Image: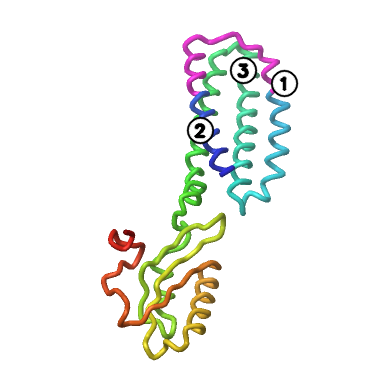
Amino acid sequence: MAALINYTTLIVIGLYLIYEGGMRLIEPPEVKGWTVVIIAGLALVVDALTAGLTYSMQKGSQNIRALFLHNLSDALASVAVIVGGTLIILYDMRWVDPAITIGIALYILYLAFAEIGGPIRTLMLGSPPDIDGGDVVAVLRQTEGVSDVHHVHLWQMEENAPALDAHVVVEDVAWGQLEQIKAELKTQIGAEFGIDHSTLEFERNEACDVEAPLFGHDKHQIE
């Protein structure tokens, strides 16, 4: 949720900066170059330090990655502002300020739209992007004693925690070995795909629905 709020805030800020930059291009205001350079320099130091502190932690957390990208974009923006302020001091190029503002805003929007899909996928219980459902089904079907699977659900239960629900059809001769089959299935999907949370429902061959969908549920079963 924190990552989604962060990226949404970046999108709102980016759109606002584009609006402000466009208005300033139409009527370039007077800009005090030295003030711009000094403030941007201080901001660059703070943003660079914060980005450096969060860099090593951002690979395993969507929330920390959102914070890191936010700080990184602020640091790059400060660099651009320093360059713009210098050009204003040397050449009185006042149009550079709104032009840089628009450029920064476009970069912020690019980062936000590129990363916001991950938090949305997690909050909407979407399927893990790095796990192929077909591969999971193949591993389940290859387990000894299993004749088929259906109603397979894969979703991102929480950050870095994929989950699985599935109906497992067990061969009649193996019905007395359900605990061993369940343990083997959980071990296999845990080792192959990192799925440590799974809910498996077992069915006999003669009792299973032959028309059941492989993934998800059909309308009749939802009702």
Q: Is residue 92 above or below residue 191?
A: above
User: Is disc 1 surrounded by few (<14), some (14 to 19) or many (20+) residues within 10 Å?
Assistant: some
Query: Could you give the CA–CA distance between mark 1 and mark 3, rounded to whole angstroms?
Result: 14 Å
- The amino acid type found where label 3 is placed reads Leu
Q: Which residue is mark 3?
A: 87
Q: Where is residue 45? Give x, y as percent.
A: 73, 32
User: Is disc 2 surrounded by few (<14), some (14 to 19) or many (20+) residues within 10 Å?
Assistant: many
- The amino acid type found where label 1 is placed reads Ile
Q: Which residue is mark 2?
A: 11
- Of residues 216 and 106, the one drawn nearer to the viewer in this rendering: 216
Q: Secondary structure at mark 1?
A: helix
Magenta stretch in the rendered image: 18-39
Q: Where is residue 171? Give x, y as percent.
A: 37, 85
Quadrant for residue 142, please give it: bottom left
Q: Secondary structure at mark 2?
A: helix
Q: Earlier in the sequence, mark 1 or mark 3?
A: 1
Q: Is residue 143 left or right of residue 212?
A: right
Quadrant for residue 42, please give it: top right
Q: Earlier in the sequence, mark 3 or mark 2?
A: 2
- The residue positioned farthest toward the bottom in the image shown: 173
- The residue positioned farthest toward the left in the image shown: 211
Residue 53 visible, this orientation: yes
Q: Earlier in the sequence, mark 1 or mark 2?
A: 2
Q: Residue at x 55, y 33 (%)?
A: 9
Q: Magenta stretch: residue 38 in it?
A: yes
Q: Is residue 12 above or below residue 61?
A: above
Query: Could you give the CA–CA distance between mark 3 and mark 2, rounded to whole angstroms?
Result: 28 Å
Residue 38 numbered tag: 1
